[in-house]
Amino acid sequence: MRQGLRHSVVVGSHEHAAPELADALRAAVAGDVDFSTTARALTSMDASNYRRVPLGVVAPRDADDVAAALAVCRTYGVPVVPRGGGTSIAGQATGTGVVLDLTRHLRSLVSLDPEARTAVVQPGLVLDRLREAARPHGLTFGPDPSTHSRCTLGGMIGNNACGSHSVAWGTTADNVRGLDVLTYGGERLRPGRDWQGAPAGLRELIGRNLAPLRTGYPDGLPRRISGYALDALLPERGADVARFLCGSEGTLGVVTEAELRLVPLPAEPTLLVLGYPDESAAADAAAGLLPYGPLTVEGMAADLVRGAGGAAAGLPRGGAWLFVEADGAPAAAELARAADALDSLLIADPAGQRALWRIREDAAGTATRMPEGGEAWPGWEDCAVPPARLGAYLRAFRSLLKEFGLRGTPYGHFGDGCVHVRIDFDLYTGHGVRDFRRFSEAVAELVVAHGGSLSGEHGDGKARAELLPRMYGDELVGLFGAVKDLWDPAGGLNPGMLVRPEPLDSGLRFPDLPVVGLGREVARCVGVAKCRTEGPSSGPGVMCPSYRATGEERHSTRGRARLLHEMALGEIITDGARSEEVREALDLCLSCKGCRSDCPAGVDMAAYKARFTEEYYAGRPWARPRSHWTMGGLPRLLDHFGPALNAATRLPFAARLAGVTPQRALPRVARESFTSWFGERASDRAPALTLWPDTFTDHLAPEAGHAAVRVLEDAGLGLTLPPGRVCCGLTYVSAGRLDAARKVMRRTLDVMVGDGEGAAGDGAGPSRPGGGTTPPGGLAVPRPVVVLEPSCAATLRSDLPELLPDDPRAALLAASVRTFAEALEELAPDWVPPRVARPVTGQTHCHQHAVLGDAADRRLRERAGMEGELAGGCCGLAGNFGFEPGHEQVSAACAEDQLLPALRAAPPHAVVLADGFSCRTQIAHTAPDRHARHLAEVLAEALEEEGPGERQRERQGER
C-alpha cells in the first residue's frame, strides 16, 4: 500500500479469488454477474487513454442489489467502480475490481412532475430518454453534453457533466435536488442541503477547515470540475451534500436514484453563427456576449470543421466560429449586433440547426483524426479558465503545443471558458509517453497561471488527479483525502481516482500493442460510443444496427473494437485470432459499414471483421460455415449453374445443404440474365458509359438492369458492358475470404483497365478493355462505370483500393464508379426526368449511406416529383447475414428498427424504393404487401406511362 493509505482494499491482488467471489455474488445478487473474458475485456477501457482490467461485472437490478454487491465485495476486500455509458474521458469508469454496470437494469424514469419541474431517475437512464419524456411538457434537463444520446444520468452526476447550454442552465450539480447513495461500508444516505445525508464527522471536519475552503478555490470559474467541491459544504452555501457529491467520480458513494431539476425549453431556439479571423478572436469575443443572455456560446476553428467533412462551406466567412443559441430571432439579432464579427448567419430552421450542431457533437471523435490522417488523443481534454481570459490562454496554449512539437484542435464551451482538445501525443513509445507527462505538467502550470481549473467538464480521473496539488496546494488536497476517508474508510470505491491518484502516465492502453495487425487500427476507437445510441435520438444514421437490436455492448462497434484491442494485447484474450470471444461478438456484425461514416473516429468494423474472419479460419477451411462457400461464392455459383439452381433450392434439404436458414425463401434465379438480354440488343449510340453487370442485377433482378438501360438511353447516353466477366468481390469480402476477393478483383482489373504495359500513342488512342483511353505511357482510364447495386458500388469505391493498395489500376477503377443517380446528374445534366409525383418510402442502402452518399439520389427524386425521405438504418438482411442460421431474430429486429415502421407509416400509394437487392428481398420477406423497386424501375415505368409525345412536349417546356 502507498504510505498514508488508511484503507484495507489492495488493488489487483484478487485474481486468485475471482471464482469464489463470482459465486458469492451470484448467490447474493438478483441481477447479472459476469466474470467472463468478454465482460472483462468490454469494461477494461472507457473513452480515455487508460486501461484497467476488472475481475468481473455485476449488473444490479435495484438498490438492494447494489447493497448486496457492495457487501460481498467488502467481505472480500475487492474494490468497486460504478459505470454508466463508459464515455468518461479521464479513466474514471475503469477499475481493477468489480465494475457495477448500472445501464442494464437501473435505467428507469421513476417519476416526472411537470408542475414542480422535477424528475426522479435511476442512474443508468440515458439523458435523451429523460429529455424525450420531458419535452411534451415543454421541459428539459439543462446539462446536455455532446454524448447526450448515450451518456447516463449517473455518469453525469459522477463527473458533474455540463454541455453546451451551461451558460444558461449550469452544470449537473446546479440541477440536482437530492440523491440516494450507498457507501462502500453499507450506509444508505439521502444527501441534500443543510448537511442532510452527511456521514458522521463530515460537518466537524469542514468546520475545522473553513479558512482554506473559503480561500483555496479559484474565483470567476463557471466550469470548476476538478477535485471535490468541498466549498458546496460551506454554511453560506447551504451545506449542500448532494451538490458536493456531484463530480466525485464514484469515489465516495454509488448513486441509486436522483431527483433532478427540469427547466423550460426555449420557445423559439435560433442559432446564430458568428465568423471570426481565428479562434483567439472568437475566444476574446465570447465573454462579451454573456450579458445578452445567450443559451450557448460554443467555439470551434476551421481545422476542426475541415475534419468534419468540409462543412465549412455552409458557415459564414472566417477562420473560427461561435455557435450562439438564443430564444427567438430578435434575441439572436441583438447578439449579432453586439458581436463585432466578420460575418454572421442566422438559422431558424431546425433541420439546418441540427446539421451544424452535428459537427460540434461529433467533435470528440473527429478531433482524433489529424488532417493528413494521423491520430490525436485525449489526455489534456477539457481545462477551463475564466471566460475573459480564454483568448490569452489559447494563444499561450498554441505556443506550448508548438514548443513540444505537438498539434491539436481546440474547441468547446467558449462562453464558459472551457476548451476541449485532442493532441497527437505519441503514446506508443517510452519517449512519447515521457513527452506526454512533461506536456501535461507544463500545461497544468499554464492553466493555473490563468486562474483556471484542470478539468472543466470531464473530471480528473487518472489524467489530471496527480496534478491537483498544482491547482489547490497540498493543504486542500490533503483535505480531499480526509474527506475520502470519512466516506470510504476501507477505500473500496474507485481507488486511484481523485485521492491518492495513480500516476497520469501509468496504465495507458497503447504501449504494448503490436506494430502490425489490427491492434493499432482498432485503437482509434476512443470510446465516445456513438454506436450505443438507440431510440429516436439516433437520427438518420446506420450505426450500429446489431447493438440497437440486442442492447449488448459486445454487439456495438465500440465493444467489438475493445475485444479486438484486447486480442491484440494478449493479456485477457490469449488465443489471438482464434479467439471465440471475438468471433462471437463479430458474428452479429452485419458488415453494414455504418461505422465507417457514422463513427466520429472512423472505425470500420466491416473491414476488421473480414480480416479477423480470414485469420480465424486460416489453415482450416473445413471449419468455415457452409454459407461462406455458398453465399460467399454466389457469383461463381450463379455464373456456372444459373437457372438450374432454382430446381435445387426446391429440394427439402436445400437450406441445410447451402448452410442457410430454412426460415427464408432463397431468391429465384432469372431465366435470362441481364448480360444475355443486353447482348441481344442493338444500339447505334456511341458508348458514354459502362454499365456494370453486378451479380444481383445480372442473375437475380435483371428487371432493374432493363429499367436502367431504358432511362439512361432516354437521357441520351450510350451504354456498353465490360468486355469480359467482372465481379467486385463483395460476397468474398463479406465472408472474410480476402485472398479469393483479391484474385477476383485482379481478374476484374485485367478486364476493365488492362495491364498498362507499353501503352503508346497520342493520348487519345484506341479503346482499352475498360472502354476508356490510354494516356501516354499510362494505364487505361475507364469511362464512367455505372453500378446499380449500391453494395457493389461501395465495394469498388472502398474495398477494391484498400485490398489492392499497390495496384494503381484499383484507384483508377474506383474513381470511375458512379451510382445510377450520379451518372444521370453528371453525364446528362439537362435531362428531364419523368414526373412520378408520388410520396416515397423505403430504404437507403447502408453501404450507400456509408460510402457513396445519396445526395444525387435525393436531387433526382425531387426533380421527378417524389416527396418524402427514405428510412435510415440497415434493413437487416445485409447480404449473406440474414440468410445465415442464428441471425433470424437480429435480422428481423434490424428491419423493425427503422425500415418496417417507415413502410407502415407510408400511404398505400407511396412508391417503395430500395436500390439494394438485399433491401428489396428483406421487404419482400417482412412486408409482402409492399413491392420495393430500384429507382431506375420507377423512372422507367413513368417513362412508359408518359409516352413519347408527352415526353417531347415536357422537354420543350423545360427548355
Image: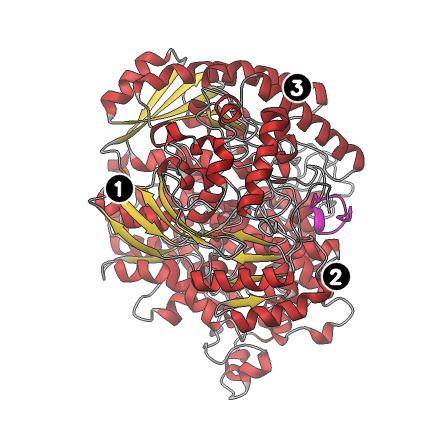
Examine the image and state in which quarter residue 446 appears: top right
- Give how far across and how far down residue 197 sits, in percent: 41, 46
Looking at the rendered image, the quarter that the C terminus falls into is top left
Q: Which residue is mark 1?
A: 139
- Give how far across and how far down residue 385 sits, in percent: 51, 21
Q: Residue at position x 74%, y 37% from top? A: 760
C-alpha gap between disc 3 and disc 1: 43 Å
Q: Which residue is mark 3?
A: 400
C-alpha gap between disc 2 and disc 1: 50 Å
| Residue located farthest toward the top when viewing the structure as drawn | 340
Q: Amino acid at mark 2?
A: Gly
| Residue located farthest toward the bottom when viewing the structure as drawn | 652
Q: Give the answer, above or below, for where 902 lies relative to 954.
A: below
Give the side of residue 521 with respect to residue 310, left or right.
right
- Give how far across and how far down residue 366 sits, in percent: 55, 37
Q: Which residue is mark 2?
A: 576
Examine the image and state in which quarter residue 809 appears: top right
Q: Which residues are magenta?
A: 507-520
Q: Going from the N terminus, do you reach mark 3 or mark 2 first? A: 3
Badge nearest the viewer, 3 or 2: 3
